[in-house]
Structures are given as structure tokens and as C-alpha cells.
Image (spheres, rainbow, N blue to C red):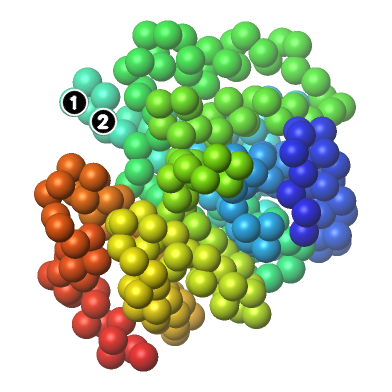
Amino acid sequence: MVLLGTADNSLQVAHELALRTVETLSNTARRIYTALVGAGLEVALEREYSPKVTQVVFFACAESVALAVGVHPSTVYRKLPELHQAGLVHCRGHFCTHNQRTRSDGSVWAVRLTPTGSAARVPFDWLKKQYRCLGADIEAGRTAWQQMRESYPSRDKSGIRLDYILRWALSTPSKNLVTFDPRTAGRVDISAIFDVPAVSKQDRAETIYNAAKAISSAIQDSNTSQRFFMAVLWNLCRVRDRTGADYFGALHTMICRVRADVEEDFARSGFALLYSRLKQAGLLGDLLRSS
């Protein structure tokens, strides 16, 4: 698959992918899938995922998906079981705390970028992330309800508007998940970890190599630890294939914390600190026993 650099091209690729899906999909479900794939391609580009990634997970509101396709939100909810059964889309509600109450602020979407393969699934760790500040969005009028109020009367029922979804799915400047720019050789993008479970099995070796290299660089350790992290990632894959347990999000969180500790001179050795925390969490023992 080639991830293209503009919304128009992403939409064209998404349309071609949707045409190759199962024939049992209704026209409306296929349009919804097209919009979600188009948004997923743009998100993958922003995060600089591997072109071989087969699933993308992002945050967006169901109302925005409806606006993008030109249908009522209830139509999106009615068609989601159809897409879920086909293994193309998995959607889970996302909740946050606002005014000391639990509120829904949108949904987390897992979208398969290939017409065939493993069913899309939202990792549990992605449901625990904070994507927006609901209070600030309400104060600034950036809610899905306000977006519906402004856009619904003039919605386009014939075309697909990815910008409605990308308003939520792409990172805000203050919460940009992408930190690596190959043109400037900047900080390493450790979100490459999420490429590992998203690629096909035959593409894992290269993806794991790149992710392990990213981890070593992120914690400012020499490449001598790269083999260890490759073994960890391979074992994570084995555990996921065998039991369905997904520890990639937990590993990503640990690395982020260790990187911060190293940058603040809290630890002399990022590798030793990460190893210690993996062992303390009981994760390292499970991985070693699975090898």
C-alpha cells in the first residue's frame, strides 16, 4: 500500500480499497468505511507509520463521521455492526471526567486499511488515553454538537468530507504524537511500536528492527540494547497471537516515562531503568517465559 500525501489522494485510495471489500456491505456502510479509511491514511501519514501498517487507531466523534458521509448519526450507529462483522471497523466509546462527572467525549476507531486480514480491534490502552480537553472544547465551541449545528444544514450528501473527521483525528499542535522528522533527524518516533502488531506476520522482522532501534535511541542507550528490545517485541507478538493480550501500549507508556526521566537526569541508564520497571510490572517475566 502507498500512503499518499493529500486528502484527495487518500480519499481516492480509500475508495479503491472499499471497492475490494466484501460484497455483502451495503452502499452506505461502504461509504462510511471509505471515509474512515481516508481519515486513517491521513493519520498514518501524520504519525509516520510504516506503509505496511494494516490498521490505524484514532479518536473521532460519530457525529463527525456522519457529517463526512452526509448521513444522520443514527445511520452510522446502525451500520457499525455491519462493518464490525466484516472485520473492517471497530468502534468503542471514549469517556473522560468533566465537572467531576464521567462524560462521553467521542469514540476511538480502529480501521483496517486492507480489504482482507485480521479483524480491526481497538486496543484497551487506547481507551485510557486523553485526546481532548472537554472543558476547553465546550468553552471554545469546539464540540461535536456545535460542529453538527454549524454544518448539518449544508452537509454534502454526494461527496465525502474528510476534514470533519480529521478535525478530531489529527493531533493538535500541543499534543502531536509524531516527534520524529527524518528530514531533520530529530527525536525518534517511538510510536513505531504500534506498527508491530499492525503489520502482517511476514513484515514483522523489518518493523520490529525499526521499532527496537527507535526504543534504544529514545532512552539514549547504545545500540547494544537493540537486540534485547527486538526479543521483547517478538515475544509481545507471540503473546498477542497466542492469548490476544496486547502489551504494546503498556510498553509505549513505560518508554515515554523512562525517556522523560533520562532527559531530566533522573536516571543514568535508560536501559537499566526500563528493564527494572518491566521486571517490577511483572511483564518481563511473562515475556521471557514465552520465548
The relative height of residue 32 versus residue 163 in the rendered view (above or below) is below
Can residue 74 be seen in the rendering of this structure? yes
Residue 246 placed where, x, y %?
Answer: 40, 68
The residue lying at 36 percent from left, 22 percent from top is 134
Q: CA distance from mark 1 to mark 2?
A: 6 Å
Q: Is residue 123 left or right of residue 153?
A: left
Quadrant of the image for the N terminus? bottom right
Is 201 located above or below residue 175 in the figure?
below
Q: Position of residue 250 (x, y in %)?
A: 31, 60
Q: Amino acid at mark 2?
A: Thr
Above-or-below relation of 150 to 234? above
- Residue at left offset 41%, top offset 32%: 175
Q: Does residue 77 appear in this view?
A: no
Residue behind mark 1:
100
Indicate the quadrant where residue 70 lies.
top right
Residue 97, numbered circle: 2
Q: Could you tell me residue 133's position as x and y percent?
A: 35, 24
